[in-house]
Image (cartoon, rainbow, N blue to C red):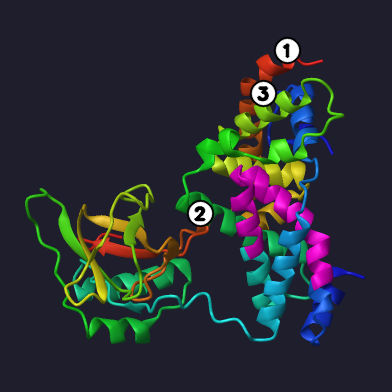
Amino acid sequence: MSDAALVRRVLEGDPRGFTLLVDRHLQPCLRFATRMLGNRQDAEDVTQEALVRAHRAIATFDLEGNFRTWLFAILVNRCRTSLLQRSRYVRRVLTDDNAILDATADDPAGATEIRIEIERAMAQLDPDQREAFLLKHVEQLGYDEMAAVTGAGVSALKMRVKRACERLQELLGEVNDVAP
Amino acid sequence: MSHRDVGNNRRPVESETIDRVITALREPVRVRPAWRAALLAGIGDQSNGSSASTVARWSFRPVTALAAAIACMMVGATLAAFLFGRPQRDQSASDVLTNLTATMPMPGEHGTASVVRFVVVAPHASRVSLVGDFNRWNPAAMPMRRSADGRSWLLDVPLTAGRHVYSFSVDGDLTADPAAPQSGDDDFGVPSSVVLVGGKA
């Protein structure tokens, strides 16, 4: 069943429709927020806020539109607001329990360290570059979708992604020199 | 999908490093079942109309005294609406302005700056601060002081002539000033307002 069909179910009064939408989009939303904010608690907060706001505003969703794009536009704004309100990002590596939670015993040697280095590098990107990089390469949105989500122009977004790649390469070059 | 389709990049980015980053970042983030359950329960409560509005934790009656003259405010609102295509909120603005103990911009010890008095009614708030492009949107930079009657929060800020974008941080929530023209600067995704000082846009 398509997202639009689920939205129709919600509008017709069936609350299970939104539960299905949540289950479909919760993982990518939480992943984006976690990578963007660098803090699991903050990520859960903004994801919850975004979904609650989406539910509250579901009647405004254009059924001909893309629900994921619409939802991510809300989420991206919540992340931006969170970054403004809380200056915790610098504590990302120190307080991030995500890596610990996700680290498993069968991780190859050094995998957790590399992941932490990647998160540390992500933390050093400008927020707009980090946002564009995550939307493009992690959530795999097209540039037109990204433009709708962020309100920025396609050319600007391409430049942000390019700068992010260059900066990551610069920051992680040394780490990858020693990685298997 | 490869990162090689990035923008106008004519110089190939080192693929191995970026591919490794992308692979790592695409790993799923664990969704805590208890959190998911609480989230769905909260949405269910909202559906049933049993939740109180979380937005109305404080009453917000906008009485920001725009430091520019009222005439400048009206011109600025018209100009902003023209430039940015935003609807004006004439009714709320006029309601507010009738209650203003507005302070006109005045040259003072700050050289060419004018002192702008920002006022917001938030009697139930515990902390309010002013954020804007003049303080890098830092909520800790400009805390507002509570008025004598305890209902309002005030702050006088010297601002240079020109256009300034700002918001209020009320108990951590950013909100635009309904008494002022909304900013068209949506790049940061924050509700914000515009004050024009010295008549420059």
For the residue marked with disc 2, what is the amino acid? Phe
Q: Which chain letter goes with mark 1?
A: A
Kindly identify the residue that appears in the image at 69 percent across and 41 percent down.
A98
Q: Is residue A25 magenta?
A: yes
Mark nearest the camera among 1 and 3 is 1
Is B178 positioned to the left or the right of A116 in the image?
left
For the residue marked with disc 3, what is the amino acid? Gln
Helix, strand or loop at label 2? It is helix
Q: Which residue is mark 1?
A: A177
Q: Magenta segment range?
A: A19-48
Q: Is residue A39 magenta?
A: yes
| Whole-percent x, y for residue A10 in the image | 79, 81
Q: Is residue A151 in sight in this rendering?
A: no
Kindly identify the residue that appears in the image at 45 percent across and 75 percent down.
B57
Question: What separation in Å lies between label 1 and label 3 (alpha carbons)?
Answer: 11 Å
- Which numbered circle lies on residue B188? 2
- Dominant secondary structure of the residues highlighted in magenta in the image: helix
Q: Which chain letter goes with mark 3?
A: A
For the residue marked with disc 1, what is the amino acid? Asp
Q: Residue furthest right?
A: A1
Helix, strand or loop at label 3? It is helix
Q: Which residue is mark 3?
A: A169
Q: Quadrant of residue B52?
A: bottom right
Say whether disc 1 or disc 3 marks the residue closer to the N-terminus.
3
| Whole-percent x, y for residue B188 in the image | 50, 54
Helix, strand or loop at label 1? It is helix
Q: Is residue A89 in sight in this rendering?
A: yes
